[in-house]
Image (cartoon, rainbow, N blue to C red):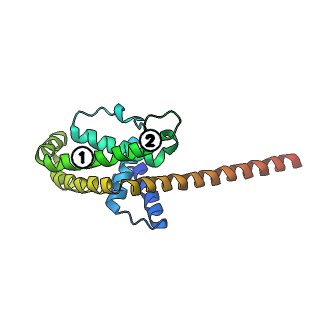
Amino acid sequence: MKGEDFLEKSFREVLKKVSAEKNMNIPQEILNYIAGVMSLYYRGLPLYLIDIVERSPFKKYKAKGDVSLLLVGLFTEWIERTNRPLTERDYINAGRLNYYNAYMYLNINFGSILEEELATLQEFQTGNISHVLMGHMEIFKNISENFEKYAFLLKEYRAENQKTAHMFDLFTEIRQKQLKEFLEEF
């Protein structure tokens, strides 16, 4: 896609690979959405659902669903720390509920949300906004219904990244060992 964020594209490619390898058959629009969420929150993920400060109910529901998905899928250890008042199941339930609420809010208030979005966009960007909102409505419903599946996708994504990082760590160790042996020869 032209003008696409490199980070989002990278996330999408790996998510697609994991989905294919695990025979998860995740729809492309869901992969695109999750990659966009990962890219958006890459630099500053709110760690608690209470930290989300959106004014619009729609954006609040969406953000709470997004954060729940990322925390359950990528930061399991953080959720499972000792003395935690919330469990992974609580975040799963919150994610499911908030994505469903985003879907319902968008469904019920489509016209007013469309007006809000159009008011914030520049004229050349307005052409396809209703189509985008309709697509997001279905995405929110789908993620709500399949939240655990998509959280599992992120867990598998994380495991894949950890294997790759471990491989590079081993490569570095081998290179350091070879360098040490080389230096000892002199």
Q: Quadrant of the rendered structure where residue 68 is?
A: top left
Residue 89, image x and y in percent?
Answer: 41, 46
Number of numbered discs visible in the structure rendering: 2
Residue where numbered disc 2 is placed? 87
Residue where numbered disc 1 is placed? 102
Residue 146, image x and y in percent?
Answer: 35, 57
Residue at the (31%, 59%) spot, across then down: 29
Rate crowding at label 1 as few (under 14), some (14 to 19) or many (20 or more) other CA atoms within 10 Å: many
Instruction: Please tell me the numbered disc located at residue 65.
Output: none
Q: Secondary structure at mark 1?
A: helix
Pointers 1 and 2 in contact (C-beta within 8 Å) = no
Rate crowding at label 2 as few (under 14), some (14 to 19) or many (20 or more) other CA atoms within 10 Å: some
Vertical order, 138 against 61 (above or below): below
Classify residue 156 as left or right of residue 179: left
Callout 1, which amino acid?
Ala
Q: Is there any visible trace of residue 4 in the rendered image?
A: no
Vertical order, 42 against 167 (above or below): above
